[in-house]
Structure formats: structure tokens, C-alpha cells
Amino acid sequence: MGVGDGTFVVGTNYGGLSYPRAVVVGDFDRDGWGDVGVLNSGNGTVSLLMGNGDGTLRGAVSYGLGSGDPYQMVVGDWNGDGWLDVAVADYWGSVRVMLNDGAGGMGGGESVWGCGGSDWVSGWGLGWGWWGGFGEWEL
């Protein structure tokens, strides 16, 4: 965290993570404070660390993705309920969406798209935006 004079305070090591591969920031519990989501490639989970509002985070709570080798994740409100959800792409080209449970936690990873083991497609990147003009954000 920045001190305000161009320096930073000494960092805090948060446990409970397993080979973190991607990080997102959002307000998952809608309390007005920034929270951190971490994609753990070591155990196939997404961990949420909720912000305390003072620059610190609470301990990690992890949610299983099922199978796959997770590579990338993005955050967005995928079902339009006003709560931030997480989408995860794995190495093999599958995308899983984990919907927020309305209390800041995540439901299980629902597979919504996959390439079926293609040799030329992998989930090394993931993005979302307003591409098709259908009135909804797209993954």
C-alpha cells in the first residue's frame, strides 16, 4: 500500500494460495471496499480475499473449479444480478463461470464453452466486452 510519499509499506503475505496464476480486483461482497480474486493453478481453485477497507485483506476463501488447468480469469456480472462473478479459461480451451452467491462467495464452476481438445486453441487469454451490440456484455 502506498504511503503517499512515493514509498510503500512492507507487504503482507497471505496464505492459502497455491501457485497463483492470475489476479482480479472487484467488490465481490458489495461493501464498498476492494476485494481480490486469485486463480490458483496448483489446486484448481479461485480464492477470494475480502478487503477490510484499510488496505488489508481477510484470509483466503477458496472455491473449486472442477477439472482443467486454469490459466486466466476475468471478473464481470455475467448473469445481470448486480453481483460480480468470475469466468476462468483453462489451458485446454474450456471456460467456466462461477456465479456470485449474493453473499460475496462463489458457486461451483459451470462449464459454458469448450473447444473439445483442439490442438490449436488454448485458454491462455480471456476477455469480455460489448462486442455484438445485443444489449449485454459478452465473454
Image (cartoon, rainbow, N blue to C red):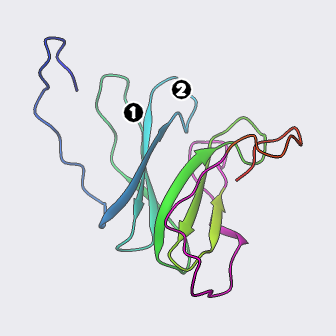
Give the residue at x 57% y 87%. Answer: 119
Residue labelled with disc 1: 51
Report the residue marked by disc 2: 31
Kindly state the secondary structure of the residue where label 1 is placed.
loop
Magenta stretch mostly in which secondary structure?
Answer: loop
Pinpoint residue 22: horizontal percent, then vertical percent: 40, 56
Residue nearer the viewer, 58 or 20: 20
Q: Is residue 109 left or right of residue 32?
A: right
Which residue does the image show at 64% across and 66% down from the upper left?
96
Q: Residue at x 46, y 26 (%)?
A: 33
Q: Which residue type does callout 1 highlight?
A: Gly
Would residue 116 be found to the left or right of residue 136 on screen?
Answer: left
Q: Residue furthest right?
A: 134
Between 20 and 136, the one lying in front of the other is 136
Q: Furthest residue to the front?
A: 120
Quick one: label 1, few (<14), some, or many (20+) residues within 10 Å?
A: many
Residue drawn 55% across and 39% down?
Answer: 28
Residue 3 lies left or right of residue 87; in this view the side is left
Q: Which residues are magenta?
A: 99-128
Q: Are marks 2 and 1 in contact (CB under 8 Å)?
A: yes
Where is residue 117 shown, x and y percent of the image?
A: 62, 88
Disc 2 is placed on an element classified as loop
Q: Is residue 113 magenta?
A: yes
Mark 2 is on which residue type?
A: Asp
